[in-house]
Amino acid sequence: MNTRKLGGSELEVSEIGLGCNNFGYVKALDVNETRRILHRAFDCGINFLDTSDSYGHSEEFLGQILGSHRSRVVLATKFGSQLDTEGKKKGASQRYIFSAVEASLSRLKTDWIDLYQLHRPDPETPIEETLRALDRLVQQGKVRHIGCSNLSAAQLIEAQETAERLGLKHFVTSQDEYSLLVRDIETDLLPAIEKFEMSQLPYFPLASGMLTGKYKRQQEHPPGTRLTDKPGLAERHATAAN
């Protein structure tokens, strides 16, 4: 397995990472299935794991399983997505970030997060406040590097320029939907990522399985697959054009 650096950081990651968003959801993978997949990934040379506090029990399962493997992996997680029905557990304010990171560290059973990512933009919080909070976490040693996800090109540029102007830690990665079928980021966002010498972490690189070849025109989707179990994704990806 070849490796690459994440942005300008010292983090050396496998070219193929393991997305952990299907661990612990209802009708998804339990802890034993998660353990089997993780160990298979390690056998294949994968050392980069990407999860989020919003991915079901994913962080908890990883915390239970990693154990002695923790120091061998580059562990990425995210904050910012809404976690409750009241709308209190979400966003990118300083107060929320400080509580969210402690919760993630506890679930992951680790003292540090290698890559802590803003899951989505928070229109109610100035980016300066978010960056100052993340910079503090880096200074405290709870986070090694920071990244972002689902920002527009304009939002990314503002964040990077703000960090540079204030001498704060800047985003080393941008995680966005990117595949042969979804290429919107190539217009504005990817050039901005390249300008700031960041790494692009594509999610849904196989278009939720559409690019694997398992789905056929005018045939029923195979049972147990993502497009079978999630009609919304099927409507989006299993189009005549695709």
Image: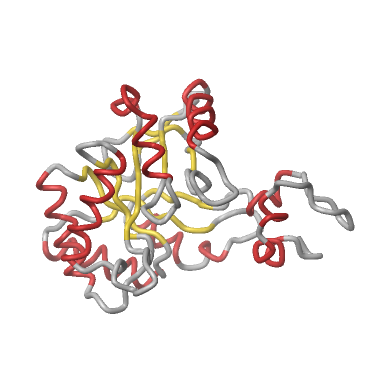
Q: Residue furthest bottom?
A: 124
Question: Quick check: 125 above or below 230?
Answer: below
- Please tell me which residue lies in front, 59 or 162: 59
Question: Quick check: 191 above or below 113?
Answer: below
**Quarter of the rendering occupied by the C terminus:** bottom right
- Please tell me which residue lies in front, 112 or 192: 112
Query: Residue at point 17% right, 65% down?
Result: 94
Question: Quick check: 70 above or below 113?
Answer: above
- Please tell me which residue lies in front, 123 or 226: 226
Residue 59 lies, in percent from the top left, at 37, 44
Query: Residue at point 18% right, 61% down?
Result: 164
Q: Say whether residue 81 is left or right of residue 29.
A: left
- Please tell me which residue lies in front, 58 or 91: 58
User: How many tags in the picture?
Assistant: 0
Residue 87 lies, in percent from the top left, at 34, 74
Query: Residue at point 15% right, 60% down?
Result: 133
Question: Quick check: 52 above or below 141?
Answer: below
Protein image colouring = secondary structure
Residue 80 lies, in percent from the top left, at 33, 63
Query: Residue at point 86% right, 56% down?
Result: 217
Q: Quadrant of residue 181?
A: bottom right
Q: Quadrant of residue 105?
A: top left
